[in-house]
Amino acid sequence: MTAPRFGSLHNGPTPEQGAESFVELARTGSARVERIASRAVTNGEWYEQAWPEFVLLVAGSAALEFADGSMRDLNPGDWAFLPAHCRHRVNWTDPASETLWLAVHLPPG
Amino acid sequence: MTAPRFGSLHNGPTPEQGAESFVELARTGSARVERIASRAVTNGEWYEQAWPEFVLLVAGSAALEFADGSMRDLNPGDWAFLPAHCRHRVNWTDPASETLWLAVHLPPG
């Protein structure tokens, strides 16, 4: 199957206020690409994954929080590479507009 | 090593007119994430890769061309999933401003 597929990150489910929605866009081997939409999230769930993750903030704004208490603001075009076992969460996303992310779950190593 | 890394797609090399520049942002296993900047490309090189690729157009505009002659315009937020062996090239990118892509080379499957 070699036919390409297309889409827009601007199309997809809109989460409830304070919540996130996840849509898988592609998956091969142990890698997958996801669209994440976040709406006015505060103090999101903590994640500590056994695989690395690359996230790109495409629209809106957000801050990631890490286990040592450090925070990183993200604006459109900003990316973060989170190694395996890097404990993190979304501290907040834009209260006024939807925040869109492209997330890539990478192979363990 | 579990410290995160950060960056912005808006920072990076500016290619010559008609050319592209590639910067690797992350690599694990057989997957890698790249920033691609394109400046007024026309009739880019053909690619036919043994692995799938996911591309997101972040800024500017472009058209992808496929072996069957079909074309697909891409604007910011648009993505394409190109399966392994899907022959493609960049037919053109925005003549007036830099086009930025996030490209993910995925494991063969």
Image: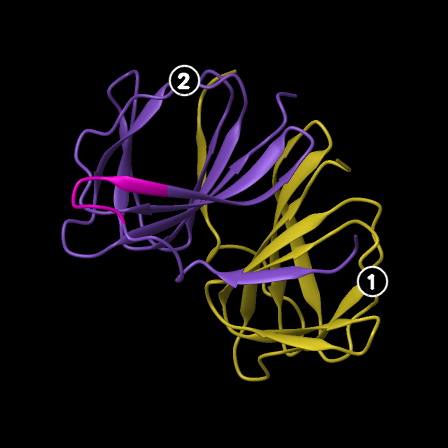
Chain colours: A purple, B yellow
Judging by the rendered image, the residue that carries numbered circle 2 is: A48
The magenta region covers A15-21
In the visual, does B2 lie left or right of B106? Answer: left
Quarter of the figure with residue A108: top right
Q: Main secondary structure of the magenta part?
A: loop
Residue located at (41% from left, 54% from top): A77
In the visual, does B67 lie left or right of B33? Answer: right
Are labels 1 and 2 on one chain?
no
Rendered position, A89 above or below B70: above
**Marked residue chain, label 1:** B
- What is the three-letter code of the residue carrying label 1? Arg
Q: Position of residue A17 (x, y in %)?
A: 16, 45
Quarter of the figure with residue A30: top right
- The mark found on residue B61 in the picture is none
**Front residue (pair A49, B34):** A49
**Marked residue chain, label 2:** A
Residue located at (26% from left, 38% from top): A63
In the visual, does B90 lie left or right of B77? Answer: right
Residue located at (70% from left, 77% from top): B71
Q: Position of residue B73 (x, y in %)?
A: 60, 76
Judging by the rendered image, the residue that carries numbered circle 1 is: B87
Estimate how packed mark 1 is, as few (under 14), some (14 to 19) or many (20 or more) residues with alpha carbons within 10 Å: some
SS type, badge 1: loop
Q: Position of residue A73 (x, y in %)?
A: 28, 41
Name the residue furthest bottom: B96
- What is the three-letter code of the residue carrying label 2? Glu
